[in-house]
Image: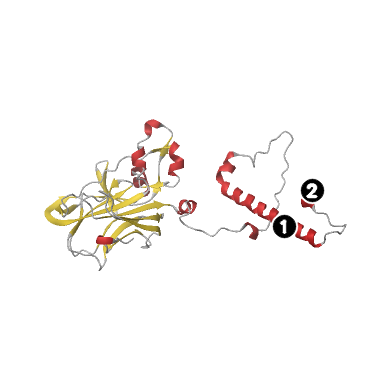
């Protein structure tokens, strides 16, 4: 995505670590500033199974006259708060987190993972407010000036817990992949390390009102969900192109009940296919009725023609 307006010249994207390909973006939209909210660009992002990195670069059109202070979040969890970008630096990224587990430091990659759910209210750790930020990657920028502050131990990322209630399944159906802590630790590569030392800095923001200058928002979803939301248009296979195959009759022992076509699971798993089939049969019925009426009109008066479409009127 590209920034627009006064902050034009920034580009942000999410990239697969193995393939080095940018993840697909859909419905890119720009929004002007409203009140305290900065201008921002958002899009839907198609997820991947591989680890990923969040990348930003300055294009030649960017007015690189100040340093930048940046803050990045995944699902509302800070992953790079206080990251400074000096004048002249053209490219920067977030691709790992530093965590501490069992008195050992680890570097872990970012990876999309299933969101844990539970039907026990006592185990729920994501409140309704936090739910709204699930499925998002955000990057916010402030203009200003960096001041070096010597070497410091790299800060450990502390992520909040992430277990949602099972009752939120309908809401989460469009957000069913999430960078939750448990998911990060299980799904990402974890490498033991010493706590790194990094160059620290103090940042003086240019705007006295502390207002950010720009924001990027990626709303990530798996491909099947984007298709379901009609964000991605996939060509539907026409029913008429599929040869009709009559269903084989099974021999059912006396006293047995065949529930293969009446289960709730069957109704839940493929309701859309059933709807398409009904619509197709209705179209075929209309077509057959029209053809019969046409044939009847062409051969009106002949005794060997019977118009079945008029049976209901007798």
Looking at the picture, how far across and down is residue 248, in whole percent?
A: 71, 49
Residue 270 visible? The answer is: no
Secondary element under disc 2, as helix, strand or loop, is helix
Query: Is 76 placed above or below 39 here?
Result: above
Mark 2 is surrounded, within 10 Å at the Cα level, by few (under 14), some (14 to 19) or many (20 or more) other residues, namely: few
Q: Quadrant of residue 116?
A: top left
Nearer to us in this view, 40 or 157: 40
Q: Is residue 228 above or below residue 57?
A: above
Cα–Cα gap, marks 1 and 2: 15 Å
Q: Position of residue 150 (x, y in %)?
A: 11, 53
Residue 40 visible? The answer is yes
Secondary structure at numbered mark 1 = helix
Location of residue 46 in the rendering, given as x and y in whole percent from the top left corner: 41, 55
The part of the image, by quadrant, that contains residue 84 is bottom left
Residue 290, numbered circle:
1
Q: Are marks 1 and 2 in contact (CB under 8 Å)?
A: no
Residue 204 spot, x, y in % from top left? 14, 53
Residue 64, numbered circle: none
Instruction: Tell which circle, 1 or 2, labels the residue nearer the N-terminal end.
Output: 1
* Quadrant location, the N terminus: bottom left
Question: Residue 311: which numbered mark, if any?
Answer: 2
Quarter of the figure with residue 129: top left
Closest to the observer, 212 or 191: 212
């Amino acid at each position: 995505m590209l920034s627009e307006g006064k902050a034009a010249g920034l580009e942000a994207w999410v990239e697969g670590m193995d393939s080095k390909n940018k993840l697909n973006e859909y419905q890119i939209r720009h929004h002007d500033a409203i009140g305290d909210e900065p201008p921002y660009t958002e899009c839907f992002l198609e997820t991947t199974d591989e680890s990923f990195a969040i990348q930003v670069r300055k294009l030649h059109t960017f007015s690189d006259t100040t340093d930048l202070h940046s803050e990045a979040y995944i699902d509302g969890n800070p992953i790079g708060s206080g990251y400074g970008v000096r004048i002249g630096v053209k490219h920067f990224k977030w691709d790992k987190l530093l965590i501490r587990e069992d008195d050992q430091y680890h570097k872990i990659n970012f990876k999309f993972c299933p969101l844990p759910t539970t039907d026990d209210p006592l185990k729920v750790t994501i409140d309704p407010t936090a739910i709204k930020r699930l499925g998002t990657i955000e990057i916010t920028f402030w203009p200003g000036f960096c001041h070096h502050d010597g070497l410091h131990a790299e800060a450990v990322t502390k992520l909040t817990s992430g277990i949602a209630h099972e009752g939120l399944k309908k809401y989460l159906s469009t957000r069913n992949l999430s960078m939750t802590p448990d998911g990060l630790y299980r799904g990402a590569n974890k490498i033991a390390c010493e706590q790194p030392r990094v160059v620290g800095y103090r940042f003086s923001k240019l705007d006295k009102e502390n207002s950010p200058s720009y924001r990027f928002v990626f709303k990530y979803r798996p491909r099947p969900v984007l298709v379901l939301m009609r964000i991605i248009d996939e060509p539907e296979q026409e029913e008429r192109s599929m040869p009709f195959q009559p269903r084989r009759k099974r021999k059912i022992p006396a006293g047995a009940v065949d529930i293969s076509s009446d289960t709730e699971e069957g109704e839940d798993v493929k309701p859309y296919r059933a709807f398409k089939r009904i619509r197709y049969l209705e179209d075929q019925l209309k077509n057959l009725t029209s053809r019969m009426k046409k044939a009847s009109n062409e051969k009106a008066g002949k005794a060997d023609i019977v118009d079945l479409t008029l049976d209901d009127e007798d």
